[in-house]
Amino acid sequence: MSKLTLISHHLCPYVQRAAIALLEKGVPFERIDIDLADKPDWFLKISPLGKVPLLRIQEDDGREEVLFESSVICEYLEETQAGIALHPTDALARAHHRGWMEFGSSVLSDLWGYETAQDAAQLEAKHKALVAKFATVERVLADGPYFAGVNFSLVDTVFGPIFRYFDLFDTLGDSPIFDGLERVKRWRKALSERGSVRGAVGEDYPQRLMEFLDKHNSILLRLPAAA
Ligand SMILES: N[C@@H](CCC(=O)N[C@@H](CS)C(=O)NCC(=O)O)C(=O)O
């Protein structure tokens, strides 16, 4: 049996996708969190883009492989590990899921701009972009509780970490993003209750996210309700 190691960072939402997939499939793995502000040499040697996540696969016979890119890692796990299926069997449905995983990455790009906004205008622009993206998501969601109904899928591994940001952001005083988006809200709740989603970060996640906002001088921390 191969030994799997997830090279990670405490806050990274892309890492969380892979961690959730591993937890869903019940695959034992080791997690190594690195400091992205001071990347270790061993990491730079094996990470083509200098980014986490990486999945290190060590075979019993000493062979070793490293995968990079969260979607590649998740697809590899889906193809090689037993346990629950995280992709639909139908090729067209699977292609749609891959599209919505990409959509989740574009939401993360807006979220980065939102959480690192320095002034009210930047925050407002990213707030609007996020509202528009989640309104689009609302239109494709059905009865839930998950993206594709009762079956948890890789799209859920992408959005669980996205929604997690708002557990903290909701307390900081910006106007709500999900108002009127009842299906999105229901999906968010279902994901927040899922064991694998909860288990993909440490207990100190909210504190680390606060530190991140502080380090980036985020305007979210300077809103009247956050003071
Ligand atoms: N497309 C990549 C994105 C991964 C990514 O952006 N990781 C961030 C942390 S969340 C990172 O390692 N950043 C370090 C850097 O860019 O120097 C994936 O899906 O794995």
Image (cartoon, grey):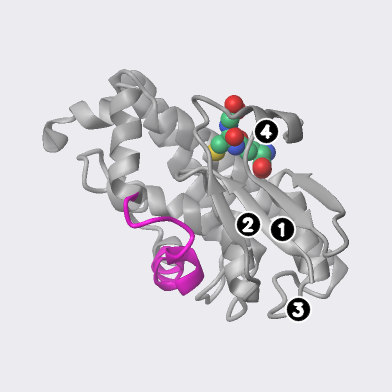
Q: How crowded is mark 3: few (under 14 residues within 10 Å), some or many (20 or more)?
A: few
What is the C-alpha distance between the residues marked 1 and 2? 6 Å
- Which residue, given by chain and number where applicable, does mark 3 sit on? 82
Q: In this view, does 32 lie above or below 223?
A: below
Disc with the residue nearer the chain's start (3 vs 4): 4
Looking at this view, is 10 or 123 the one in front?
10
Query: Where residue 174 sits: x, y (%)?
Result: 25, 38
Q: Is residue 62 left or right of residue 146?
A: right
What is the C-alpha distance between the residues marked 1 and 3? 13 Å
Q: Does the residue labelled 1 lie within 8 Å of ligand 1?
A: no
- Which residue, given by chain and number where applicable, does mark 1 sit on? 74
Q: What is the secondary structure assignment of the residue under circle 2?
A: helix
- Which residue, given by chain and number where applicable, does mark 4 sit on? 42
The residue at 62%/46% (across/down) is 7
**Marks 1 and 2 close (CB-CB < 8 Å):** yes
Quadrant assignment for the C terminus: top left
- Which residue, given by chain and number where applicable, does mark 2 sit on? 18
Q: Which of marks 4 and 2 is in front?
A: 4
